[in-house]
Amino acid sequence: MPPTPMRFQDRTEAGRLLAERLAASSIPSPFVVAGIPRGGVIVAQPVAARLGAPLTVVHARKLTLDPASGLALGAVDQDGQVFINSAVAPSLNLDPGVLDAAEARARAEIRRQKELYRARPIADFLPGHAVVLVDDGLATGLTMRAAVAYVRRLGAKAVYVATPCASSGAAHRFRDETEGFVSLVVDPWFVAVSSYYNLYPSVSDQEVAAVLGRMEGTADREKRAHSREGEMPCPPHS
C-alpha cells in the first residue's frame, strides 16, 4: 500500500507553506515570481507576497485530443513553441491534422488569457532577473517544461521551479534542468494533482485577473511610499 500523501486545504494554504520553504532558499536577487495559469497563479500569490517579489504569469498549455481530454500530447508556450510528449504522442499514430488542431486550440487559449489578464509581461523583467515558476502541481511536468524553456530563451539569469506536489519523474527532471526545485510533496505513486488537496475547485479567469490586479496595486502603492520616503522635506518659506 502506498503511503497517504500530505494534503493541503486549498491552493492558498499550499502557497503559504511553499512560500515558507522558498524563504529559506538562496534565490539570487532580483527575481520575479510567475504563476502558470490558472491554478498556479493562486499558489504563486502568497509566494510573491512572502518573498516581496513581483507577481506575473508565464503562459503554457497542454496539448490534448479535445478540450475535455486529460491526455497530454505535449505542451505549447506563449511564443508558440511546441514540446511533444514522446511517451504518448508517437504511439497514438495521430493524423497530423489532430495535432495541428490541438496546437491551434492551445495558442488561441493563451492569446485569450493574455488579453484578459493584462499581466505585466515576464519579458519586462528579462534578462536580468531570476524567475521562480509556480504551478499547483506537476504530474508529467510538460507545461512547466515549456515555461522553463520560454524564460530561458528570454534570458532568465536563473530558473527555479516551485510546486506543492510533484511526481517523482517531474521532480527528477526539474532538479536536473533548473537552478533550484522545491516541492513539498514528491510522490512516486502520483496520480492526479487534485488528490493532494481537500478543496480543489476550478479557478476562473476572473479570479486570476483579480489576484494579479491586487498584487500590481500593492506593488504600485509600495513604490509610491518608497518614493515619498526618499523625498527631501521642503524648506520653510522665509
Image (cartoon, rainbow, N blue to C red):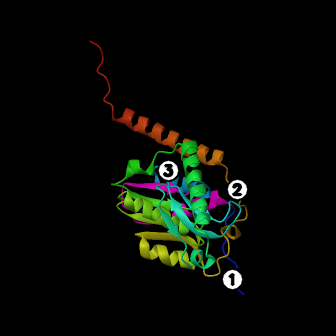
Instruction: Give the x, y percent position of residue 104.
Output: 57, 56
In the shown orientation, is residue 25 left or right of residue 144?
left
Judged by depth in the image, the label closer to the viewer, 1 or 3, is 3
**Distance between the Cα atoms at labels 3 and 2?**
20 Å
Q: Do the residues labelled 1 and 3 touch (CB within 8 Å)?
A: no
Q: Which of marks 1 and 3 is nearer the N terminus?
A: 1
Question: Where is 30 relative to 178, above or below?
Answer: above
Q: Residue 202 carries which label?
A: 2
Judged by depth in the image, the label closer to the viewer, 2 or 1, is 2
Which amino acid type corresponds to the residue marked 2 in the rendered image?
Ser
Q: Which residue lies furthest to the top in this view?
A: 238
Q: In which quarter of the image is residue 196?
A: bottom right
Which amino acid type corresponds to the residue marked 3 in the rendered image?
Thr
The residue drawn where x is 55% and y is 79% is 169
**Distance between the Cα atoms at labels 1 and 3?**
35 Å
In the shown orientation, is residue 194 left or right of residue 43?
right
The residue drawn where x is 70% and y is 56% is 202
Work out whether residue 82 can be spotted: yes
